[in-house]
Image: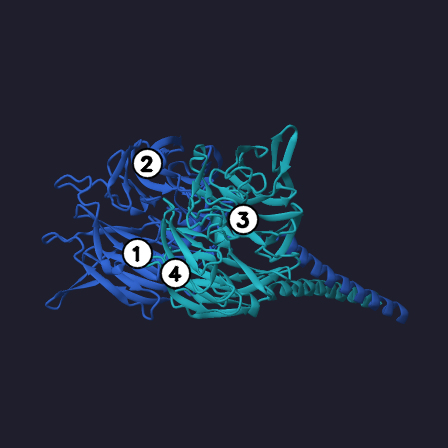
Chain colours: A blue, B cyan
Amino acid sequence: MNKFVSRLAASTLLLIFVAFLAGCAVSNRTVQDTPKKRWGTAALMVVVERESGSVLVFDSTKHEFLGRITGLGNLKHATMVFSRDGSYAYVFQRDGWMSKLDLLSLELVKRVKAGDDSIGGAITQDGKYIAVGNYKPGGITIVDAETMEIVKVIPAIRDLGDGKTMESRVVGVADAPDNLLLFALMDADGIWIVDAGKPDFPVIKKHWDIGAEGDTGAMPYDAFLGSDGRYYVVGLLNANYMAMIDTWNLEAGVQKILTEQGAEPGKVPLWKVPHLEGWTVMGGLAVVPALKENRVIVYDAKSWELVKYIDTLGTALFNVGSPDGKKVWVDIVGPGGDSIQVIDIKTLSVVKTIKVGEGAIHPQFTPKGEAVYVSVMDEGKVVVYNSATYEKIKEFPAQRPSGIFCTSRAHQFGL
Amino acid sequence: MNKFVSRLAASTLLLIFVAFLAGCAVSNRTVQDTPKKRWGTAALMVVVERESGSVLVFDSTKHEFLGRITGLGNLKHATMVFSRDGSYAYVFQRDGWMSKLDLLSLELVKRVKAGDDSIGGAITQDGKYIAVGNYKPGGITIVDAETMEIVKVIPAIRDLGDGKTMESRVVGVADAPDNLLLFALMDADGIWIVDAGKPDFPVIKKHWDIGAEGDTGAMPYDAFLGSDGRYYVVGLLNANYMAMIDTWNLEAGVQKILTEQGAEPGKVPLWKVPHLEGWTVMGGLAVVPALKENRVIVYDAKSWELVKYIDTLGTALFNVGSPDGKKVWVDIVGPGGDSIQVIDIKTLSVVKTIKVGEGAIHPQFTPKGEAVYVSVMDEGKVVVYNSATYEKIKEFPAQRPSGIFCTSRAHQFGL
């Protein structure tokens, strides 16, 4: 029996060892059989699904769906900026929440309540901070991009004298060279400049009465930084011109551009569209959607003289320039809203009308422009076009998709 | 004994099961304890270590060393291009080898012998192909970017009539909008254009005698595509001008620019430097290093009229424009080679001289320009500067570092 027991013990030990190895192997196989999918982050497309509070992430080099990130809350009019390495998206929501998304693991990292009523924001040139523009409480909230902690709140308050002050809604937050942040004060008729590279984020300049005529404030309603990163242009509801700051020459102050352009007495000019993001400035031209008119206006971006009117199928919303500067893709709202029109910059004429589908909006080019992603909101899909042949390359199901943002925006000022 | 055996068997089974679980656990712990480091790929800096046949990879958002990729062979005068998602680098070597590097796993993926004597290359707009320019055999080799298989060889051969032909070295391969590839034929005095979007890569245009004077060929020696992606400029050894093709208007053919500019009779003009990559074209200006002269020349990039000479500490090699278009960083070779000089574009004057170290070359900006990486070849290090304050942020050891390439180049034509 001793022999039997010792043989049994030996076999048992062997079996235990084999079982241990098997455990290791099974576990390793699990790891090896499901290798974590990896991707480069320089050319990801992030699509906002408005009602469902989620975003879709696509690899735009292979036109491949990578996944959906959910739980972001209300994404109506949501916009986003990206960390410079393309690995994080910062999503601005109208309800004041700002979400940090990990585009490598496709997870919601953290959310922060940056205000009660917010209207977009910017990431500083050095990538360290996110500035959120708030309607309520009026001002900007600066958040650490790494930790998502609020590091500074700058209230937008104008001193009216006699101890009276006025709190103002903030619009058009943009990042500019030299680590500057610019924004406009809607109610208080101002433009402020913050140096985000200095400790405690000083407001280095407060421009007031940028468009005041009589008792009426100019009412800045939006702003944008041209794609050259130099000129900050502010739209004004109560003025027949726009305000511009040359960020290379801050001493020059606020200049008036597009004076009276296209305006009739007592009527606001055509170019007063809600989204100034819809402007494209490239190759010395500004291509501007005209509100309530079935045309696009082309200005010389230096003199701001009118160059040409280009008739479109309907009311243009977003004019999006191609990376090679040769074309502008224009989406249409209202009648004709199922189409995208393509304007050739050399001839300044419509060269193609593409029937994309109902609610076709937000064309977004891949970084080198060989393809374009378009949301087809009312048909629940995202479609991808070959920008040279206008052929459809692919389409993906999506839940009422709207804004599309490519991570290549990480490297552009004002986006 | 039956009871004893059955109890023993039960214990054994239990032990085996526990051992199996332990195996699983140990294996899992191994995986969890060493999580694979991950990074975004949109802002990586890749530094060539010439003699050791390796590259260093840095995360330029955190200024962090990620790792070294070795075994690349001779990297003298090596250059590289990137896949649009920033996850792969394609390194061109003078000995005809082209290597594909994985910037996520930091591994050499594959090498292909594209020629016997090569001189750089380009990645097509659609990201599908890599074109390698060869001195020997004269021509270009087109390689599938995914598989690294050679898909087409286009010999650069000129028909001289009477059954005679001439094989030519190729220089200045560049990718342009509309999926075009352009390159110059050094010995055969030509510029060819390939449509890389069409099956079998047809040569759609062969320009000949672009600078022939009498019996002498113009001898194109290098070329570049301006940062706007539009103008292809070719340097000619035997002509007192340069050749230019407007890629938006191929019908216009080859134009002559910089005619006689800065040239004395019988002497080649100043701007004949070996690397035309050393040119910066931005904001309507071309900032050009002047060979053998201690100055930089500024031309109007439209009329090609001389704007200004700017004296430098020595002979400039690479003029590198900042992403915001406000500054140009210039490295110096020969006397003064320990310094980098900074030119302000607004005033067209040197605003700063930085003593970086012996053999300071190849300044490269981070994608939004807040920092600059510089190789200090003779002191074995890579240093990082704050571009606003000119303070040194960090330095890293490196083995005779030379060229520095940021993955943000993936989105620019001609780079």
Q: CA distance from mark 1 to mark 2?
A: 26 Å
- The answer to which of marks 1 and 2 sits earlier in the sequence is 1
Residue at mark 4: B343
Tell me, for residue A332, which label it has, or none. Answer: 2
Q: Amino acid at mark 3?
A: Ser
Outermost residue on the front side: it is B265
Q: Amino acid at mark 2?
A: Ile
Residue at mark 1: A173
- The residue at 29%/63% (across/down) is A194
Q: Residues within 10 Å of mark 4 (few under 14, many from 20)?
A: many
Q: Position of residue A265 (x, y in %)?
A: 12, 40
Q: Position of residue B56 (x, y in %)?
A: 57, 62
Are labels 1 and 3 assigned to the same chain? no
Residue at mark 3: B83
Q: Amino acid at mark 4?
A: Ile
Q: Residues within 10 Å of mark 1 (few under 14, many from 20)?
A: many
Q: CA distance from mark 3 to mark 2?
A: 33 Å
Callout 2 secondary element: strand
Callout 4 secondary element: strand
- The residue at 75%/66% (across/down) is B11
Q: CA distance from mark 1 to mark 3?
A: 32 Å
In what quadrant of the picture does the N terminus of chain A appear?
Answer: bottom right
Above or below: residue B166 compared with residue B56: above
Is A282 left, or right, of B147 in this rendering?
Answer: left
CB within 8 Å, label 1 to label 2: no
